[in-house]
Image (cartoon, grey):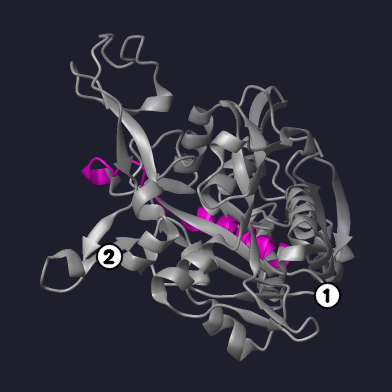
Amino acid sequence: MSQGIEGVTLEKIVSLCKRRGFIYQSAEIYGGLNGVYDTGHLGLLLKENLKAAWKKSVSLNHYTTLFIDGALLGHQEMWKASGHVSNFHDPMVDCLNCKKRYRTDDVDVSKSCPSCGEKKWTESRTFNLMFQTNLGANVDSSSVAYLRPETAQTIFVNFKNIYMPNRVKIPFGVGQIGKAFRNEITPKQFLFRMREFEQMELEWFCHPDRTDMFFELWLDERRKFYTKIGITATRIRLRQHSGDELSHYSKQTTDIEYHFPFGWKELEGIANRGDFDLSQHRTHSGKDCYISDEERNMSFIPNVIECSVGVDRLFLTVLFDAYCEDTVEDDTRIVLKLSPKIAPIKAAFFPLMKVFDKPMEEIFHKIKSSSSLSLLYDHSGSIGKRYRRSDEIGIPFCFTFDFESEETKTVTIRYRDTLAQERIGVDRINDFLIQECTL
């Protein structure tokens, strides 16, 4: 389903998020923290729906996927073994005039500073993106730890802790949803590049002989995921990394990119990490990570296919894709055409007039008590204003109790995207919502 408009801008999305309580800048009353945001009620509901959809999408039939929740603080030796201490850097330059700092690849140092117009730059230098801290009262080299810049390593260092007690067989997956932290030089484009963010990562462990097959399988599965949650297929593409842009751990990487108003950008990365991570941790820790293949009478270190997407970047993507403006009765209507399966609130219940409050409240509470779906009751303002409010936060269905309702035991259902209306029996509402909104 084609959604959105060509004229959507980042400024419109930021305004909508603030106005309707999806996302706010953290500590805004004190000037805010750059690259750090707090999530409001509607934003949290939408994120939870995206996470649930992701968990379902990585739990394939005929295979096992397990889930863990790793620690945010990581041992410094873990990050040395993974290569992050030595490799997790970005190049940066400073303007000598205004002192503004930029990623080198975001500015052309042969041109003027975009902030002050001067052409006076420092030499490009590297900057480690990890947040370093110290554990305990003593501050020395032995107390160093890092906030994790990705969730993957807590899966790799726990491989045997996961593999042995769960009695799984290769191939299998381990998924994790959790916070990660990167001290970005220049956070930008709202939720696109942040210092504190949330990741959804799947590490798929397989026999080395089947790595290529599973890489292609996951490319296909991950691409299908985005159309299933309602993102416009023509705005999605696959882009394979060239050899000079591969990460230090990757043998092969393909990005799923989305066409944002600011260009084609990465939404998710699918990488063949080979046995890099398990081998590195085996070498640095001295702990065995081989598993036995009884059929072949051999032992091997599993290879890994990784699928990694940011919750916040996906959140931003679905807002861009769903945002639409149209004209209804000579008035501009802002609407989020979110798939009912991920919409933060699935349905709104309105009494047409105040006199219908009691019977509609009874219907609302009955449906709410028998369903786990998020629902809204609203009796404030004209019916037109209530429709506009529900459209702007992406509610796909509105049920209205009107003059015919009591006699016919029906309500009017109004469809967000088409504005079409029809009558539906009160006893059918629950089944209708389950059918339309369940993942």
Amino acid at the residue labelled 1: His
Cα separation between marks 1 and 2? 39 Å
Q: Which of marks 1 and 2 is nearer the N terminus?
A: 1
Please rate how many residues cluster around mark 2, counting C-alpha atoms within 10 Å: few if below 14, some from 14 to 19, many from 20.
Answer: many
12 vs 142: above or below: above
Is residue 256 at all visible to an observer of this figure?
Answer: yes
Say which of 247 and 94 sits in front.
247
Q: Which residue is drawn at 72% across and 33% down?
A: 235
Q: Is mark 1 on a helix, strand or loop?
A: loop
Give the answer, above or below, for where 178 lies relative to 186. Answer: below
Magenta-colored segment: predominant secondary structure: helix
Res 125 quadrant in image: top left
- Across and down, in percent, residue 226 comes to 73, 48
Which is in the foreground here, disc 1 or disc 2? Answer: 2
**How crowded is the residue under tag 1: few (<14 C-alpha within 10 Å), some, or many (20+)?**
few
As shown in the figure, which amino acid type bears the numbered disc 2? Ala
Residue, x 47% and y 36% (percent of image)?
14
Q: Name the residue under label 1.
A: 62
Q: Give the range drawn in magenta.
A: 29-57
Estimate the x, y position of residue 251 in percent, counting from the top left.
62, 49
Residue 237 marker: none
Disc sitting over residue 145 in the figure? 2
Q: How many marks?
A: 2
Image quadrant occupied by the C terminus: bottom right
Q: Which is nearer the eye, 112 or 360?
A: 112
